[in-house]
Every structure is written in C-alpha cells, then in structure tokens.
Image (tube, helix red, strand yellow):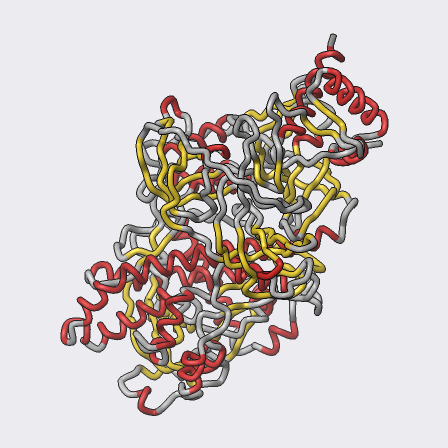
Amino acid sequence: MKNKQVFEKRKKFIMELLSDPLYKPMRLRELGTLLSLKKPERKELFDILEELSLEGKVSMDAKGRYSKVSGKYGRKIYGNERNTEGPLEKKEYRPGRNEKYSEKKSGKKNPEIEGTIKEGVFIGHPKGFGFVEIEGEDEDVFIPEEDTGTAMHQDRVRIVIKDGGKDGKRREGIVTKVLERGMTEIVGTFQSNRDYGFVVSDNPKFSRDIFIPRKESKGVRNGDKVIAAVTDYGSKNKSPEGRITEILGNIRTPGTDILAIVKSFGIPCEFPEKVLNQAMRVPDHVLDADRNGRLDLCHLQTVTIDGEDAKDLDDAISLTKENGHYHLGVHIADVSNYVQGGSALDREALKRGTSVYLADRVIPMLPERLSNGICSLNQGEDRLALSCLMEIDESGAVVDHKIAETVIRVDERMSYTDVKNILEDTDPQAKARYEELVPMFFLMKELSELIRSSRHSRGSIDFDFPESKIILNAAGRAIDVKPYEANAATRIIEDFMLLANETVAKEYCKGEYPFVYRTHENPDSEKVESLLTLIRNQGIPVQKSGKEISPKEIQEILEKIQGLPNEPMLSRLILRTMKQARYTTECSGHFGLAAKYYCHFTSPIRRYPDLQIHRIIKDNLRGRLEREGKTEHYREILDEVARQSSVCERRADEAERESDKLKKAEYMSYHLGETFEGIISGVTGWGFYVELPNTVEGLVHVNTLWDDYYTFDQGNCELRGDMTGKVYRLGQKVRVRVEDADPLMKTIDFVIERDF
C-alpha cells in the first residue's frame, strides 16, 4: 500500500514537472539527469511515464522526448509565447527560437472586467506572471500569467483588482492597459536562426525574447552581447520585435559580461566631453585664495584608513585625549569647492547619484582627475576639507562640536590590514614603521569601543554579515570567493563616520535648515508579526511590548539567537523585515541605528547627497542661506535630489548584486561535481537555498529530492517529506554537490550529496 502511495505521489510530481511552462520535451535519460536519479530509480521513472502514457496524459515524440498531452484543442508553444486560449485560431505571431517564421492574424478581444481600477508599475517574473507596485501602497498586486496582457517588466499599467485581498490572501489583478513602456532597450545575448535571430534578455524579469529580422541585425554574431531597441512590443501571441543598436562584444571576451550588466541598468559609464573638459580646468593643488577664511589643521596628526586598493580617499581622522575627554576630528574632502552647483560636473554627478563598485571595475560619480586627484586626501598633500570636530566624554557622548572649513595634511595613508595587525600585535614590521602613530591607533580603538557600546545601549542594531570578496585573474575570470570579515580597523572608521553623520544631522535638524537626511523607517507591523511567529516556531521565546517593535527589541532578539546554528539565517530574515533606507528632506530618524538624527556627510566623492549637504553647510557657515536667498533655493531642489539619489542608490545596489552573482556562478562553474558543506539559508516551495562558508549561495530544487514528495511548511520555514517525514529547515547543515552553474543566468544549482 505504501509503495503504491509513493508511486502515485511521484506520478503527480512528474505531471507537475511536465506541466511547468518552462519545461521543454526531454528524453528519459535527460529527465533522469535533471532529477539526479540512480539507474534503479530511472527504471521507476520509465514505469511512471509508461503509465501516464497509457492514461493519455503524456506522449512521446519520434525522438523519444516526453511532453504533456494537450486538451481537446491542444496547446502550442511558439518559442516562449504561450497560447492557452481555447480553440486554435489563426493568430498573428513571430516565431520563437528554433521555429520557422510565418505570419498569421487574429482579432480576439478581452471580455469586460469589473473591479477596482489602479495604476502602477509592472514587475515581471521569469515564469511569466508578475506583480504591480502601486505608489503609496506597501503591498503589490499579483498578476497571473494569463492576465498580464502585453505588459512587460517596468511598464506602467492600468489594472483591475479582481480579488481584494480578503482573508489574508494576496490581491490579484488583471492588466487592462499598458500606459507607458518602461524598457525601450534590452541588453541580452543574440541567438541566430538562419535568416533572423533573437535577443534573450539578461534580465530574467523581461521574460520574452526580442525577434530581430536579418536586416536589423547589424552583422551581429551568435553569442554576442548586444543592446536591442524595441520597435514593436508585439501582443499576447506575437513576439516583440527590435533592431540591434550596439554590439558589446562576445560573451567570452573579458569584461563583456560586466559591461552588459552596466548597460542593462542604464548606468552612465562614459563622461561627456563637456564634463571632462570642466574637470581638466580644476587645479591639481590647493590655491592660496582657497585657503582664505579656513581653519589650518595641518599641524594635527592625521591619517586615512582605507582598503589597500582604494584610490578615492575622502575621509581622514585625527584624535587626541585631554582631561579625560577625546577630541576627534573627522575631516571630509571639500569636493564642493571644485564641483559648483548647477555646473556640468554637478549635473552629471546628480545623474549618476553614486559611484558603482562592481566585481572588476568602479564606475565613479566624478571624473578620475577629481576623485583620485585634488579631491582625494592624499598623503603629504595639503587638501581642503569640511571637518566635524567633536569633544566626547567618558560615556561616548558628544558634549561639544564644531563644523568648519579647514585645510589638512594627511601624515600617513594607512590600510585596514596594517592598522588591524598593529592593534592585534601580529606585525612587528608595521608596528615599527608606524611607531609614532601607534599610540593614536590604540586611542582610536579605545574610543571606537566606547562609541559602539553607547550606540548598543540605546538599541542600535548591528548585522554582522561577511561581505563577499571576489578574486579575479588577469582575464577577468573569478578564481576565488572569500568572506570579507569586519575587523578592529574597519569598525574604527565605521564608528567615527556614524558619529560624525549623527552630529551634523542633529545640528541641521535642530536649526531647521533645508537638508537631506538618511531615513530608515520602522518596519511593517504585519511583517514583524510573521517574523516573530517564525522565530517562536524555532523554539526561541521572543515578544514585543508595544504595537510597533523597537530597535532595542530587535537587538535583544539578535542576542538571543547568538551562537545558535541558525543564527546567520534568522539574522537575514530579521534584516529582510526591515525597510530600505532612503534619502528624504525630513528628519524622521534611522530605525536600524536607533538614531533620532542621521545623514550622509562623509563621502562626497562617491555619494551625491553628501556633496549636496556640504554646499548647504558651507552656505550656512558663510551666512549665505538667509542673506542671498539660498534657503528657498534649496527647499525647491532638495526633494528631487533626495528622490534621484535614492533611485540611483537602488540601481547601484542591484547592479553590484548582479555582478557578484555572475562572478560567483562563474567561479562555481569551475567546480562542477565537487561537494561542499553549507547551511540552508532559505526555504521555498520550489526548493531550498544553501550558503557555503565562502558566501556562495545555490539552490537545491525540490524536484531533485527524489526520495519523497516534499511539502512546504511556510510557518516553520521547512520542507517536509510526506512519506518519510524527513525535514529540510532553515539553518540546517547539509552536504551538497555542485550540479550546475550558469554565469549567463547567474544561477547555481546544488543537489544533496548521497551515498551511491
């Protein structure tokens, strides 16, 4: 009886696999490989397919490939266009890849739909369905594949909400009209097919291929990375059409893969000639006229502490201690002295919003002549700065401060590694070389620990996740991936920069000046409740006292899970519950830091909001805010500055993530068949994610777990076998084998390692 139940479960599973819209007909051997089956198990797979064939649910073509049998009228697929609408009519379509081109016409109309009408932005999904994000609403609307119409990723659409989200269910809707196309150009890989070709988008959310007629192919070769302008968005049953506008290079050419990511996110990577010319006119040394009215701090013992590869050094530190009080100077490059508001340099900086740090390159916000030259606090060179000079007592509180225009000179350009080794007494040579600075470094560590303790006492949340450090060879190939851990030196800089940011924000908020703040809002109450339920299901007693959770309560939860096997995964779930920080013109605080006042003041070389508030600070110091009407000017422009900066920051973050995913997949593609031990970092209905110690994450598909039929338990965040009761849960250690790694799709597939 049990064997029969297992057989029926597996039949159901195979039918679900063959019914998946992304499934392409496969032979028995290919299916067996996909499911990671041993030879005896492939015999059972054959028996299942035979029985499904007898039942008329599965058919096999002349090449031995299995597919689901369509209904009365069939279901025909043209490339990735899915026709599921009743009897086959004469419909206009363009071929999918590997299909012969022909033209058919259709005139079917959509039925009238009733419901709440909304407008928003369509977010596509690789499987064909999507979501619509509506401005001002926290929850998006789910759009089933059959109801997406002709909407594509990033389109602005009008929808009818047919399900109001009652009983806790997600709202569901139908796209009735595309109001504005969001993507006019597609970056992807060209695939040729005789007299025409297709561009397969690098962005999986844009799930339809772009048909390219031969006359519009521009001589592109198979496998080239290209940019295609969309000339016709097609219809439900007709592929979009386009023309090649730029050939980025063959995918095997070093750097082409990252360049494609840059282009796909629309990140400007070349500076206009006018901007470069303006940068060339900037002097390469401090002019005597620029020193007038500034506080000369060149006598202070001052250092920069950065990564070994850093070239744009925009912050320097000085520190002394007198009568029990610390005198900390955070000196920030005065970029605003060289980038005037409204200039070509300034407009380009606002357009970029931020520097972008990718696996093999940096795309700077400012031209290199500025960012690595006069605006960089280079060792031994006089430089203009905006300094936040703070007096700090024994409790870590700022008891007095001054913000001033200054001239500084950096004594040493220190690296994180050297400072760390000096503090840990692991490098006698470094200690001897920087003998005069060693006392200051230990004083920095002392003050850093004091500031961190003070911040912790008020409830600041500290997520200590290792970042990824991807090592590339000369050809741009990923040859290693390592966790990049924080250390005493990185913590010193972080603590001092945070304190300067808070101090500046507090002064300008209390003074009610026009300003740009860094805002982190309280998390959504419903998401918090779901999180707390999940944590309690893990056997960890947690609660909150009020309607909204406080930073201190989040901090206490992190302390409770500290040291547990699933600590990293629960920490990530807590992080995902948090809202995304953004730039605003209102000072509403920073939840994660438990800070009432916060801004970004310390990186004007690579972040536009910092550059903008430097101008405001200098105008205030010089009395120009009121006298010259600058207050009204800033109030008019700052909302757009904050919005644009937030958009550019999200764009940069996404591009950096995609770059890392690509290089991690490339690295793992050199390790196919190897086994690793990892921890389950996420569980879904389609499988679970496993993170390796080197920060690489891959997916174990549920359809490769052939030993049972698994059900997803969302409340406990686990997959449970129906017959065996075997469980795969968050935080569990598993041993996996690298089954596949696809740099083009940026995916890594694992299978659970078993004894054969």
From the viewer's side, name the closer residue of 463 and 674: 674
Residue shown at 85% from the left, 29% from the top: 39
**Residue farthest along the left direction in this orientation:** 627
> How many callouts does the rendering have?
0
Q: Does residue 408 appear anywhere in the picture?
A: yes
Q: Position of residue 57 (x, y in %)?
A: 68, 20
Quarter holding residue 136:
top left
389 sits to left or right of 711: left
656 sits to left or right of 738: left
Q: Position of residue 185 (x, y in %)?
A: 49, 57
Q: Position of residue 541 (x, y in %)?
A: 47, 28
Q: Does residue 458 appear anywhere in the picture?
A: no
Above or below, 56 relative to 498: above
Residue shown at 36% from the left, 24% from the top: 166
**Residue farthest along the top direction in this orientation:** 1
Residue shown at 59% from the left, 28% from the top: 718
Quarter holding residue 61:
top right
**Quarter of the image with the C terminus in it:** top right
Residue shown at 45% from the left, 80% from the top: 273
Q: Position of residue 51 (x, y in %)?
A: 76, 17
415 sits to left or right of 427: left
From the viewer's side, name the closer residue of 143 and 394: 143
Above or below, 52 relative to 245: above
**Quarter of the image with the N terminus in it:** top right
